Image (cartoon, rainbow, N blue to C red):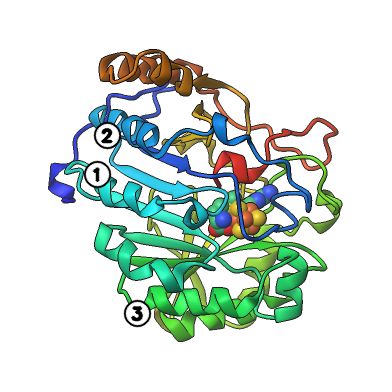
């Protein structure tokens, strides 16, 4: 994968935004049950409705032919999907793919980090909301903190281009730990992003408006401990990055769908595990690509035309409202965060 080979994307929506980034949810299953992501007794999609790894690869190849040069593999927990390395290995050989990245909860990284690096994965986001084992168990319902910490260490040892911790911040769960999490990242020379919880999926057992913690509150709290300055740094996502004047190797990011809307510069779409191409995380506009690949097996041209047509469905922005009774029933694990 080489930056110089990247081509102009042919995917442009009605608002003039160019799409060069796709997130693939490769499974809705997970070995954790984070309170903000899914209910304790989650109904998973029947296996017959899931895309096969071959179908995912074929869809990914079509996107790359159309100029997409960044793919993030997500889920559910991507590393619990059987034979998932096959997908990483195959995508990693595609010349025009510049950035192959992964979002994971880290539980399987001790086993997979080296193979992912060898496959060509460039950057990894690892979710970690707390450094306290009891809270980790509460927030994930079943998780063991040490397993994720071991996974983070394993990834650090493999020298990826970027490792970033993702922390969803919730009042009365972990909002008092932001300084500790930043210190954890400084000690390891890795980045961190704080995420405002999004109202995806019903049946959560907490009141999302009551646990809401804005990025500005977190930033203000951190400014008591560090000198923090904004940067113009951009990766492919919606993160706003800050620099720590005394710690060059750690950037702090904020993903703030509520307090700082990022839809204007949206450059990405998502493929659910059932093959539904979602044009916006916070809306239901979609195209059924599973139907396209299954009714025209091996016909890359038809698939590419369907993808081009789908761009016309991309809405202007999300409508996230923590106080609204109308929520998107789709949980984050299905969508791919
Ligand atoms: N299992 C992997 C993980 O946890 O990193 C990948 C999938 S997970 C759905 C992707 C990201 O979405 C994680 O960083 C997670 O914390 C975040 N996430 C899940 N539900 C969310 C919600 N309701 N609001 C904001 N972020 C959420
Ligand atoms: Fe699993 Fe990730 Fe959702 Fe947590 S956030 S339940 S680790 S998919």
- Is any part of residue 107 visible from this angle? yes
Residue 99 vs residue 329: left or right? left
Residue 46 image offset from top left, x and y in percent: 62, 34
Q: CA distance from mark 1 to mark 3?
A: 24 Å
Q: Nearer the viewer, residue 188 or 92?
A: 92
Residue 295 vs residue 129: left or right? left
Residue 37 vs 166, above or below: the answer is above
> If the picture is divided into quarters, which one holds ligand 2?
bottom right
Secondary structure, mark 3, is loop
Question: Residue beneath label 3, please?
Answer: 157
How crowded pointer 2 is (Cα within 10 Å; few <14, some 14-19, many 20+) is rated as many
Residue 191 image offset from top left, x and y in percent: 45, 70
Secondary structure, mark 1, is loop
Residue 113 image offset from top left, x and y in percent: 38, 68
Q: Nearer the viewer, residue 109 or 270?
A: 109
Q: Nearer the viewer, residue 45 or 265?
A: 45
Question: Residue beneath label 1, please?
Answer: 97
Give the image quarter of residue 53.
Answer: top left
Q: CA distance from mark 1 to mark 2?
A: 7 Å
Residue in view at x 35 percent, y 14 percent: 296
């Amino acid at each position: 994968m080489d930056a110089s080979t990247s081509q102009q994307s042919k995917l442009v929506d009605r608002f003039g935004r160019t799409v060069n980034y796709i997130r693939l949810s490769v499974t809705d299953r997970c070995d954790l049950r984070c309170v903000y992501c899914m209910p304790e007794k989650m109904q998973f999609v029947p296996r017959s409705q899931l895309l096969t790894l071959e179908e995912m690869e074929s869809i990914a190849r079509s996107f790359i032919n159309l100029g997409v040069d960044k793919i993030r593999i997500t889920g559910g927990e991507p590393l619990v999907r059987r034979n998932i390395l096959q997908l990483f290995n195959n995508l990693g050989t595609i010349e025009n793919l510049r950035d192959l990245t992964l979002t994971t909860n880290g539980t399987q990284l001790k086993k997979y980090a080296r193979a992912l690096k060898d496959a060509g994965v460039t950057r990894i986001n690892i979710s970690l909301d707390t450094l306290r084992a009891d809270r980790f168990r509460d927030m994930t319902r079943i998780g063991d903190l040490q397993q994720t910490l071991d996974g983070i260490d394993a990834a650090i040892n493999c020298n990826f281009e970027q490792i970033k911790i993702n922390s969803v911040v919730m009042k009365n769960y972990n909002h008092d730990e932001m300084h500790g999490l930043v210190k954890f990242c400084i000690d390891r020379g890795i980045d961190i992003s704080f995420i405002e919880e999004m109202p995806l999926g019903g049946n959560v057992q907490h009141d999302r408006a009551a646990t809401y913690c804005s990025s500005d509150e977190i930033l203000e709290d951190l400014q008591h401990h560090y000198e923090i300055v904004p940067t113009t740094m951009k990766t492919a996502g919606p993160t706003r990055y800050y620099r720590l004047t005394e710690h060059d190797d750690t950037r702090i990011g904020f993903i703030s769908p509520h307090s700082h809307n990022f839809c204007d510069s949206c450059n990405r779409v998502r493929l659910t595990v059932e093959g539904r191409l979602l044009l916006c995380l916070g809306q239901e506009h979609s195209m059924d690509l599973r139907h396209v690949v299954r009714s025209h097996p091996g016909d890359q041209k038809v698939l590419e035309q369907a993808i081009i047509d789908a761009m016309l469905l991309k809405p202007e922005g999300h409508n996230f409202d923590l106080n609204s009774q109308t929520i998107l029933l789709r949980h984050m694990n299905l969508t791919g965060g």
